[in-house]
Image (tube, coloured by chain):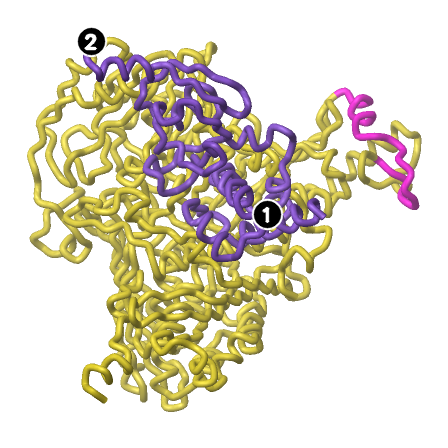
Amino acid sequence: MLLNRASVGERWRIRPDGPAKVTGSLEYLTDMAREGMLHGLVLRSEYPHARIRSIRTDQAKRLEGVHGVLTYLDVPGLNAFGIARPDQPVLCEDRVRYVGDAVACVAAETPELAARALALIEVDYELLPVVAGPIEALRGDAPQLHPQGNALHRTSFRRGDVEEGFKQCAHIVEETYETPRQMHTYMETEGGLFVPEADGRLTVYSPTQHGFMDRMQLSRILAVPQQSIRVVSSPIGGSFGGKDELNVQPYGALLAMHTGRPVKIHQTRWESVRAGLKRHPMRIAMKTGTDAAGRLIAHRASIVADTGPYSTLGAEVLNFATEHVIGPYRYDHVDVEGVSAFTNNGMSGEFRGFGGNQAIFALEGQMDRLAERLGMDPWAFRKLNLRRPEDPGPFDQPIAATEGAVKVWEAIAECSLWLERGAPAESGQAMLEPWIKTGIGAAFTMHGAGLGVGIPDPAGGRLTLAPDGKIEAAFGYEEFGQGLIATLELMLIEQFGFAADDIRIIIGDTDAVPDSGSTTASRATSMMWKSLRRLKEPFASRLLERAASVLDAETGELRLGEGGIRERAGEALLLTYRELADAEQSPIRCETSFSFPTSPTDRVGAHFMYTYSAVAAKVELNVLTGRVKVLRQFHAVAAGPVMNPQGYLGQIEGGSSMALGFALLEDAVMEEGRYMTRNLDTYLVPTIADQRGAVDVLPIEHLPEGDEHGPRGIGEVGSVTLGPAIAAAIRQASGKWVTRLPVDPASLQETPVFLSEAVNGG
Amino acid sequence: MSEGETVKNEYDELRCTINGTDYSIAAPPSERLLMILRDRLGLTGTKRSCDIGRCGACMVLIDGKSVNACLAMAYQCGGKRITTIEGVAAGGIDPIQQAFLEEGGFQCGYCTPGMIVSVAALLGEHPDPTDDEIAEALSGNLCRCTGYGGIWRAVKRAIEARRSAAT
């Protein structure tokens, strides 16, 4: 059944955070202000690559109203950050490696004064040759950006003997695919308020996807214990992976500690573009072959990623891409090699899909090309080669088995959009202007969730009957729009029987929540579900035991319900949660902590739980302009039970809009290490006019009997599958293969037949 | 005294109506309305995002028409009737806001105030707009979270709600 408001009935609920969002009364962390606060600004490098000869700050410091001008000399602890490897300088000392590198930061009484102070800082640079791309970075004569060289990370995976495999192939397709430097484009740029407290602690009000990770990184930089920092990190005006790494927090924190006053930072869009993360541009070469009957035999992939100047999660993204260029298909022989290279371009890092978007665009392109070579229906070709539920994962690792792959395959095979593809094209074409062509394509994704083998991936949460009688659910997760609060509320209502009014949800505050791990990698809903499952028995038992003692009853006669403890057999409310709390000396509290399940393998980055998705899309191409419109989309998603229908639909619709941008519009263009696209006038994201086509979403909730893992992640997969489906649809519409995203309209322009006839007098 | 200075003095005092209240604000004539609203008046429902009029996060109504507050300077606002998202919600949740709530026309919510202001401007002018008119009216409001599906549904629902209220 398609997912929509009508089909899900009462489970479609108004989000608890909705009223404050639609009325504008919700205070985002970048809306905060304090009496007497200062305004912070960061001086970023003028050049993509240069040596710093000197930094002179005297003039800036002398300016009245300026309270802090800081350089590397003022960083008390580790002058570096990075989730995986701290190699990005907080404030550069002797060298800058990209145009976002921070050299100094200032705090002043007004934003104008801060800008003036910034302009008064004199940095003497000696220009160095720019490493403008990953291929040149890996040449022997390239300037070396780090002591270990220009290769951040290399990966490889081998199964069988790929050369032998190609000898057995009847059909071989070779192609190279290129993907853009996509920008997250969260509407709220980076910022926040940094408040030194009277007790010597520091409160950081700034968006992030893992408050405890920020706290740890900031404690290293400030050289203070983690406990002396409080990170408040929700609500967030969009993140998509882009705010997981530290951004302006080190500068706000240093300036607040230095001046002893609250400091506000809110980056302009250009500062955000310049300093912020992007999706790794990748160049993926593939060679894939089948036997005469169309069975895949050998698959080789070579990935080159532009990771920019510092590590952040570049290695982990490459691991993910390495796994996902293999994907859900069976081959006897596989050979994958990947390299992620340092360059003087913008920072690449974590972004929804995490390397899967690029990998799957390439892999699905191979499948379509091979099917066409064989004269087969592309979907039938995929079925022939699709994994079985009991098959190991892409790295030959054990995975949590589901029938998701075949079920999403079947959903596409049966959907009206795919059936329309097989219908004679002429009947529809006759109705259209001669320069309008349509096409339908489909693509498949098997997307891993969780951080994978080799990376600590903690989870957990806490339930408390608070003194005021509220059921308090505390999780270290963040609300960046995905609907986490709404999902948690609905799970508490459905699993425990509470009413919405009984519940208080606490997230995004390191002083108030347990460390539940990061809100990334499509993991939070799965981990909240699992936490509640683990907490249900102990928490419910303790509430009922205490209630039984207050009521002088047997626990077997009682149950949890709306408003309080009710009689098991009926509806009667026997004891409100408030009355129960009043009767207790101390709050009733249960906490759980565990880890995201991982595969029993030593292959770093291998996943255990996967979401399967398949998308059919219909496009319209205007061959006069080369512009492509997406007319209809059908998404089948196998991710276990739907925890929050509105959130699920929103994640697939919203993710697919990012995929549409990735395929058709978006690229943060760089030349010689400088951004050419500096704001939203040249960096184009989809508007409502680009999203007029229907998007149907079919959730496939089936899980095997005895499955213990519950809902799989859906936060990222929506952003992955539509891209290659659009490329396949363009092939049907135009006869042209897409190898590079975003599609260049000029490559799809044609002189229509009627025009050439006119010219030729035909 | 030169003519330029006369003009400057005249505009140093911005007099306008914001959400039904008359204001007299001492502001440089070139100060952007966005900063006046957010920094001077604490009306932070109007959001800052691109600063160049391309995203619509700072959309407000000036005499009923949608305007990017990042592109309106103080001197352009003299004598005008300005409505921000706080003004749209002044009488409780507006039917447009209710439609966004019920259809899930928002996620992170950062674009939502500007989006709702643009919908209010549209429906103020065309109570029963075509899809082309909706797309045109909202194409200056970027939303990065929803993919616009929930926004389409919310706008349709708001139109429907107004229609039923009118009959």
In this figure, which residue is indicated by the disc labeled 1?
A: B104
Say whether residue A717 is visible: no
- Amino acid carrying label 2: it is Met
Are dots 1 and 2 in contact, CB under 8 Å? no
In this figure, which residue is indicated by the disc labeled 2?
A: B1
Q: Which chain is yellow?
A: A
- Amino acid carrying label 1: it is Gly
Screen quadrant of the C terminus of chain A = bottom left
Residue at position x 42%, y 68% in the image? A327
Give residue A275's quadrant in the image. top left
Q: Is residue A645 left or right of residue A176?
A: right
Q: Is residue A491 left or right of residue A27?
A: right
The percent position of residue A149, horizontal first and vertical second, equals 17, 48
The percent position of residue A634, horizontal first and vertical second, equals 53, 67
Chain to which the residue tagged by mark 1 belongs: B
Name the front one of labels 1 and 2.
2
> Which class describes the residues within 10 Å of circle 1: few (<14), some (14-19), or many (20+)?
many
Residues under labels 1 and 2: Cα distance? 58 Å
Chain to which the residue tagged by mark 2 belongs: B
Q: Which residues are magenta?
A: A565-585
Please tell me whether residue A322 belongs to the stretch shown in magenta: no
Residue at position x 46%, y 23% in the image? A32
The percent position of residue A423, horizontal first and vertical second, equals 49, 84
Residue at position x 38%, y 36% in the image? B49
Q: Secondary structure at mark 2?
A: loop
Q: Secondary structure at mark 1?
A: loop
- Confirm whether circles 1 and 2 share one chain: yes
Please tell me whether residue A576 belongs to the stretch shown in magenta: yes
Placement of B135 over or under A185, stated as above or below: below
Q: Earlier in the sequence, mark 1 or mark 2?
A: 2
Q: Looking at this view, is A167 or A728 the one in front? A: A728
* Colour representing chain B: purple
